[in-house]
Image (cartoon, rainbow, N blue to C red):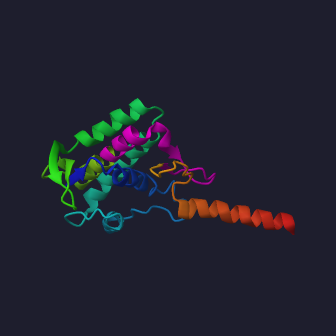
Amino acid sequence: MKIDFSDYVRGAALAADLVNSAPEVRRISGEVLVDAAALGRFLTERGIGPEREPVAEDLVRVLELRRELRAVLEARDEDGVAEAAGELVRRASTGPVLGRDADGRWQWQVETAPRASLADELAVLAGLGLLGALRALGHERFRPCASPVCDGVFVDTSKAGRRRYCTPGLCGNRINVANHRARHRERG
């Protein structure tokens, strides 16, 4: 796998999405990654098509990675994020190379080791994303979800930096619906 240094949004989103797939975050729907096939669908939906179909061992390792990523996203200071995300990158990376992106432009990339596990490849992608977000946006963009009924976390990579919810379409909508219903009860 080759990962562009400049594409930190993809890796940061993967890190948050993995963390937020846990049953303690998805209280209503439960565990998202229930089996290896679900892991394959999860990655495909995010444009990370694994070279082979994930197996049970891949799932076990990705679930371990998910716990590590939560700790990185919840780190209290930027040095903690940098150190932990750097460890993730060192797991399976072979170092930077200069390669062409999909548009033919030269980009600095990190290549993963030829026989790296799926979890280690994802660790490199997520680690680079978190390091890139830390450098470009700062530690204050690593946030918990603002919903009182959610334990999700995310990295706000939006331009304005005002994102409040880990999953705006889910957590944000729930808050908006609850507020709307409360206003209607007050009126009537």
Q: Position of residue 101 (x, y in %)?
A: 21, 57
The answer to which quarter of the image holds residue 181 is bottom right
Is 125 left, or right, of 136 in this rendering?
Answer: left
Relative to 34, say whether 132 is above or below. above
Q: Position of residue 164 (x, y in %)?
A: 57, 51
Farthest right residue? 188
Q: Quadrant of the C terminus?
A: bottom right
Is 124 left, or right, of 80 in this rendering?
Answer: left
The residue at the point 37 percent across, 52 percent down is 9
Where does the magenta region start and end?
A: 128-154
Relative to 92, say whether 79 is above or below. above
Residue 150: say if magenta: yes
Residue 121: say if magenta: no
Q: How many marks?
A: 0
Is 169 left, or right, of 89 in this rendering?
Answer: right
The residue at the point 21 percent across, 61 percent down is 102
Q: Position of residue 12 (x, y in %)?
A: 38, 50
The residue at the point 19 percent across, 64 percent down is 51
Farthest left residue? 114
Identify which residue, 105 or 146, lies in the foreground. 105
Q: Position of residue 166 (x, y in %)?
A: 51, 54
The answer to which quarter of the image holds residue 134 is top left
Q: Quadrant of the N terminus?
A: bottom left
Identify which residue, 19 or 10, lies in the foreground. 10
